[in-house]
Image (tube, rainbow, N blue to C red):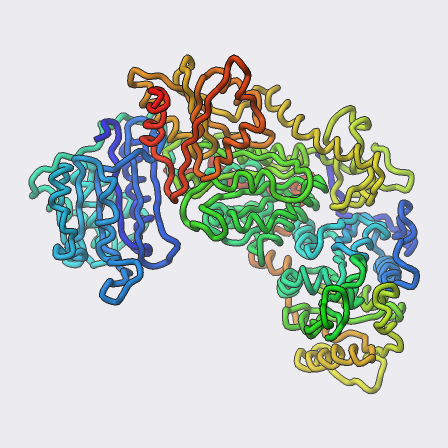
Amino acid sequence: MNQETTTWRIAGGSGDGIDSTSRNFATVLKREGYHIFTHRHYPSRIRGGHTFAEIRIGNKPVLSRGDGYDVLLALGDSFARSESDGAYYGNEEIKPLTENLHDLNEGGVIVYDSSQISSDELPDNLEERADENNWSVIPVGLKDLARENGRAIMRNTAGVGFTAAMLGVDRTSIEDILAESMGDEILEQNKDVLEEAYNRVEKMEDVDIDLPDVVEHDEDQVLLSGDDAVTYGAVDEGVQFIAGYPMTPWTGVFSRLSQIIPKNGGVAEQVEDEIAACAMAVGASHAGAKAMSGSSGGGFALMSEPLGMAEMTETPIVLLEAQRGGPSTGLPTKPEQSDLEHVLYTSQGDGMRFVVAPGNIRECYEQTRLAFQVAYDYQLPGIVMTDQKISGEFRTVDKSFFERDTNLGDIGKTLTEDEIAEEDHHETGKFNRYQYLDDLDGDSVSPRTIPGQKDGRHLTTGNEHNKQGHISEDPENRQEQMDRRMQKLDDIQEDLIDVEYTLQTEFGDEEADVGVITFGSQQGTVREAVDRVNESSDSVKGLGVSQLKPFPVKDVQEFLDSVDECIVVEMNASEQFRNEMVKHVETRRRPHDISLHSLTRYDGNPVRPKQVEDKITQVINNE
Amino acid sequence: MNDFTPLRNDRDEEQVDKDDFTPGIEPQATWCPGCGDFAVLKALKQASAERGLSPDEMLLVTGIGCSGKLSSYFESYGLHSIHGRALPVGRAAKLANTDLEVVVAGGDGDGYGIGGNHFMHTARENHDMTYIVFNNEIFGLTKGQTSPTSPKGHKSKTQYGGSAKDPVRPLSMALSAGASYIARTAATNPRQAAEIVEEAMEHDGFAHIDFLTQCPTWNKDAKEYVPYTDVQQSDDFNFDVSDRAEASQMMEKVEDKLYEGEVLTGRFYVEDTDRPSYHQEKVARGAMSETPVAYQNFGAEREDDYTDAEDLVEKHL
């Protein structure tokens, strides 16, 4: 069993409150002083079907979901389709137990609700497997316990209480969190159920399962997800407009911002489709608002054309692409990183966009802010890529991390009416919205005006256009406009280097000859694997890439040049990140050839640290 | 950062002339001789002048096609967007700055075909804007393919054996979707066209104008939309424009008659209820501030109690 962390898993059916129960318990553990990392697994179904939530509990910051887990709380599935009725998905009633056995660690504990999962239904070999793996299997009539001391529906409280008691969690901290969401009779009944669960454990023979020793946090911790962090990044940038259409997993950020933006004086719109959503972000931004939209794979596909309009008209917008398994409807509720090429290359013509993929919760906040700043400073789309994994992962973060200055009201180079009066206009009175590089002393960004401003009139069009925005097919003008727009990517890269702002995270042993490189949400997993290898006699280093367009050639080339072999880790089948990397960097600089290896996963589950660790060992040992 | 003048409140008392809406850069439209599109441009200039608008406070959003060029030939802030998407672009601009006079224009393929979904939803939301559809029953700029309003049996290179589809019913569609002002006018009737465009701009909600614009190049078979009848001027038609049922019946007749060679124009539905426009509705629900969003970036006070991340993480303790 892993020495530093304990992982608790609650399993049941969709609609059984698995998610909210686990979130409450995670908050309890955070308040006890632990570091937390959560993971969710759920089907694309409202009622019933195999779902679980995991809490990995440590006394140091937890980097990933880890490998196996230690405690299973198997509730029933209240909405199970029965096998006797010819259920397509098999016997769902016992799935909360049987579907979770394959990755339960040695020495693990299974607590199952024997009032919902009858002992006749247990798999034949459970006893044998328990012996082999040194598992403790504990049937508890959780639903009955709940009914007798409160109400049957309080079985989740009973289960949490039972496992919490085994782990030595203080009962009053669970009572505190219950009191925050309920009152009166319901609260009292829940407390009674909880007390009885604790009593049962006290009377039971001791089971060898513990939490790590608590190390007090230096400061207050907050427990939040990638979705929360993206949302708060947008809020601190002063986002004023959001338009979207529901789609998993984008809905998390969309619904959060739809609640916050109107309270802050802005506008949130759920609209007819993603084409409208993206077109509206363009319209709102054009009229002077700080605007965003977003979606997941299929919805993002619909945004291709308005995305190109934003590039051509040089209208700042921010988009979130929350990836899930593809192609097509794919795996709606499972993580994948297979939209990389889609996001980098979609829409006709030569694209000019800024793309980042944050690697952890903090980066979700910081890089969303950066996407807004770059989008508005350079008048182009800024795209943040998350995925179903990072969007729903809850982690502990120092509360003080969010004590930042906001950036309200900054919409980039936009002239005031006084400034417009000073500017040169075309002889017809039109404002020169799209000037050439020479007019701007080499700057790629031409200042804009907002409809309604006096004497700022110009035309804005998706056609190629001249300085006043009027349609033009003149070859010289075309060349000038293209060159200026294309230069934005170089300018962004230079600006980031000038302020020594790197979006890449390097970790591990600097001297190592073997490296692991990944992008976006896999950073923590790779980091954990790298740490583990370095604790052994081998050494390895890692790089988590977040900046995807413009591609961070210098950072990645330097990393590659420093190793002989490099493993590329990504959650897709066609090695999209590796291909992108190879396009930009040199791996054949004789005599220093770098061998690249790939580790991909696309079965609907995130990469596990053990997989990466094994791959590293394999490469080091030349297997 | 200094002020952004909401022109409407702070306008010079200059007299505006329709010629003020003629741009110096492209004063002459490049539409074919005899094209109905000229009439839309003329009517819009006249109506804007009559309304006393200044070019700076207008945003003209257009789609793609011959009709989309309107924004090149009209002096104002112009946004020539992408095919079928002018409505969401325009309504978002209106939400971002409710002081803007937003006019959206496009062709029948743009509005009733590729952008049909947006037409339906923009109408039901009743955004305070004017939508002019250049209806020439053909795809002109791409050289004469069948459009959503082409009659059944219409022959073109993309319809082997002639179109097997019934044409769309633009007025009925607008009514059932929820537009609050619906009219049809024709290029051949410039006086009525200017009046209707002006009324539509004045209307406090979503105003839809189906503007019959003959295409002399690619739709020679179609009528030149003469003679036309103004139903409000004719004794043959008697219906209440504010009554949905009567309006609906009338629209069906008008839509059928067009393909029989009878051009019926006029106002077909003018809502007289106290239904608010979309942004008014949102403001009333507390879902939008009265100060236009765009002004918040130009000196207007942002809400003092702006909720930032530091406030929001309190609930994650």
Decide if residue A308 is on the left or right side of residue A51.
right
Decide if residue A294 is on the left or right side of residue A20.
right
The residue depicted at 81 percent of the width and 69 percent of the height is: B212
The answer to which image quadrant residue B251 occupies is bottom right
Can residue A251 be spotted in the picture? yes
| Foreground pick, A349 / B50 | A349
Decide if residue A444 is on the left or right side of residue A261.
right
In the rendered view of the protein, which quadrant contains the C terminus of chain B? top left
| Foreground pick, A190 / A523 | A523
Query: How many numbered marks appear?
Result: 0
The answer to which image quadrant residue A128 occupies is top left
Whole-percent x, y for residue B130 in the image: 74, 61
Q: Is residue B271 above or below residue A126?
A: below
Q: Is residue B251 above or below residue A193?
A: below
Whole-percent x, y for residue B25 in the image: 89, 45
Decide if residue A66 is on the left or right side of residue A409.
left
| Foreground pick, A460 / B217 | B217
